[in-house]
Image: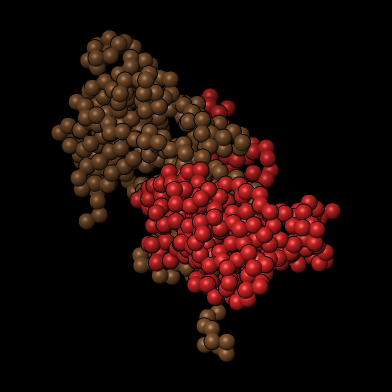
Chain colours: A brown, B red
């Protein structure tokens, strides 16, 4: 107590100079040490950014509006915050930091369209329910890093249709669960399904993220790809894409998702016998994509 | 062209090591140089944060959920992103960086409750429409930094009621525009109004920001204050608070808004004559708060 009978507490009053320390000190009672570390680092970098650019009141207010509008754009079938994370390269950075390749298939972003469950389908099934686009046979095998086949692995695939839209973006135009399928590998770890050759497409531009891209002179397009999410017991799962070689935008993916190891040719097959065997019209396109899973650490 | 007939473009493929540069390069065509600077800095600091803490997939997903829930909490009378900015000290940092004192009254955060216009009122009016709390007379004058009075300045005030809630938080319990008023200073730059002594109160804790405070062991309280926003032609406006000396939480404001220069005593006056002159019951509380505006740069 001092002579005025008040507490002698020397309050750490907020100042621009010491702002990070003052705010970080407020987190001192955080019981989860990981949360404490994350918040302390976040506040440090966030304040450093604000000071670096000397953010004005109006710019701060614009940022609040942008975040609020991004929130308002979110719905059960639209995730504008994931889109924002994607176009700022944050999704890809997190993906890359957490998934060392180490002999396995490289991962890439999940993207915002895995919002409904894929329907389980028999091997060889056709996931293109709307009859549009260039028919394509996809084959591949799931193996461990030692090359041993992984039977019973689940291979979850989803892609945009020939017009560049996912089913959930066009609930009135596309059949439900169009171009989605959940397959299980056979005794030799193999999978196969029929689909269409994917087309490049723009990410949704009718929200705040679209306005951000426009203001920065960036195109919104993603090179053509099929999403894969492959899981099996005792292996680490992998979320990745199969990219079409030669697709437009392969060098300027709006979400930075391209890795060279994930690009494959989709050659034309002109052979009535093979077309009949694949249950596809002749000619058709084909692609082979093997997925290598790393064993779980024991 | 190389021998394969393809473009020689050396694509800057994404890598964790060079992630900031790859994303920053995507902003090269931004026409507004200020936006370019802000986004480049933002991406640099954001990626540095992710790398610093090695954010996991699950933590990234939790961050997306947190932002989405923060967005879902926003409404015309609730601004959860401003609350988030407030509890992370970002609002106060922006305010402090942009408002050098320089002889004028210090500013502080606007807070998320200036969401409806204050009703214009005559000098001396009582803004406490719900009849609750300890009656208080607020007096003051608006001057320039040279001490000259500023007649015709607008003094916008708003505060929580005796239970610690703003009118917009309790539309069914409080009269509309309770404890809000827009006053105009008289020929000598003076203002006066009747109200109640504000009480400390918690910021709203029923949303994601409340959960963040709980997880970090932080209390949600703000020391007792009256908001002021003072404007006059040829002067810079100031957004600030008048804090009650001795209020709980004066040293641990949940939004870091306290500045020593903004704290005032609210002494009790026990004098029937003065009470009658103020049109308040005896005894009553009183406070004097002079506001000094800086001239606009010419």
Q: Residue at x 21, y 30 (%)?
A: A120
Residue B278, image x, y percentages: 65, 66
Nearer the observer, A259 or A199: A199
Q: Residue at x 39, y 67 (%)?
A: B217
Q: Residue at x 24, y 17 (%)?
A: A278
Q: Is residue A22 above or below residue A177?
A: below
Residue A33, image x, y percentages: 37, 66
Residue A10, visible in the rendered structure = yes
Q: Residue at x 50, y 71 (%)?
A: B249
Q: Is residue A212 above or below residue B296?
A: above
Question: Which corner quadrant of the image does residue A279 belong to?
Answer: top left
Residue B94, visible in the rendered structure = no
Nearer the observer, B61 or A185: B61
Question: Which corner quadrant of the image does residue A48 belong to?
Answer: bottom right
Residue B201, image x, y percentages: 47, 63
Nearer the observer, B255 or B186: B186
Task: Find the residue positioned furthest to the left.
Answer: A187
Please give left or right for residue A268 compared with residue A18 in the image.
Answer: left
- From the image, which quarter does the C terminus of chain A lie in? bottom left
Nearer the observer, A46 or B172: B172
Please give left or right for residue B237 compared with residue B14 in the image.
Answer: right
Q: Is residue B147 above or below residue A184?
A: below
Residue A213, image x, y percentages: 56, 35
């Amino acid at each position: 107590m001092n002579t005025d009978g008040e507490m002698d507490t020397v309050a750490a009053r907020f100042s621009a100079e010491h702002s990070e320390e003052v705010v970080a000190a407020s987190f001192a009672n955080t019981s989860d040490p990981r949360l404490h570390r994350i918040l302390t680092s976040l506040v440090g970098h966030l304040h450093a950014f604000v000071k670096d650019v000397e953010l004005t009141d109006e710019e701060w207010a614009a940022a609040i509006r942008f975040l609020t509008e991004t929130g308002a754009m979110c719905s059960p079938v639209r995730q504008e915050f994931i889109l924002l994370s994607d176009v700022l390269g944050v999704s890809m950075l997190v993906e890359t930091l957490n998934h060392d390749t180490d002999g396995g298939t490289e991962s890439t972003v999940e993207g915002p369209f895995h919002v409904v469950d894929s329907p389980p389908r028999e091997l060889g099934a056709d996931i293109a329910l709307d009859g549009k686009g260039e028919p394509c046979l996809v084959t591949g095998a799931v193996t461990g890093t030692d090359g041993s086949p992984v039977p019973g692995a689940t291979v979850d695939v989803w892609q945009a249709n020939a017009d560049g839209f996912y089913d959930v973006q066009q609930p009135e135009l596309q059949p439900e669960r169009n171009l989605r399928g959940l397959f299980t590998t056979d005794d030799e770890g193999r999978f196969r399904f029929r689909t269409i050759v994917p087309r490049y497409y723009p990410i949704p531009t009718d929200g705040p993220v679209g306005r951000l891209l426009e203001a920065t002179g960036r195109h919104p397009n993603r090179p053509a790809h099929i999403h894969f999410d492959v899981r099996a017991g005792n292996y680490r799962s992998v979320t990745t894409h199969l990219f079409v070689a030669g697709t437009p935008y392969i060098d300027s993916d709006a979400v930075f998702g391209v890795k060279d190891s994930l690009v494959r040719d989709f050659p034309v097959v002109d052979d009535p016998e093979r077309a009949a065997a694949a249950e596809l019209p002749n000619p058709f396109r084909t692609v082979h994509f093997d997925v290598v899973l790393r064993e779980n650490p024991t």
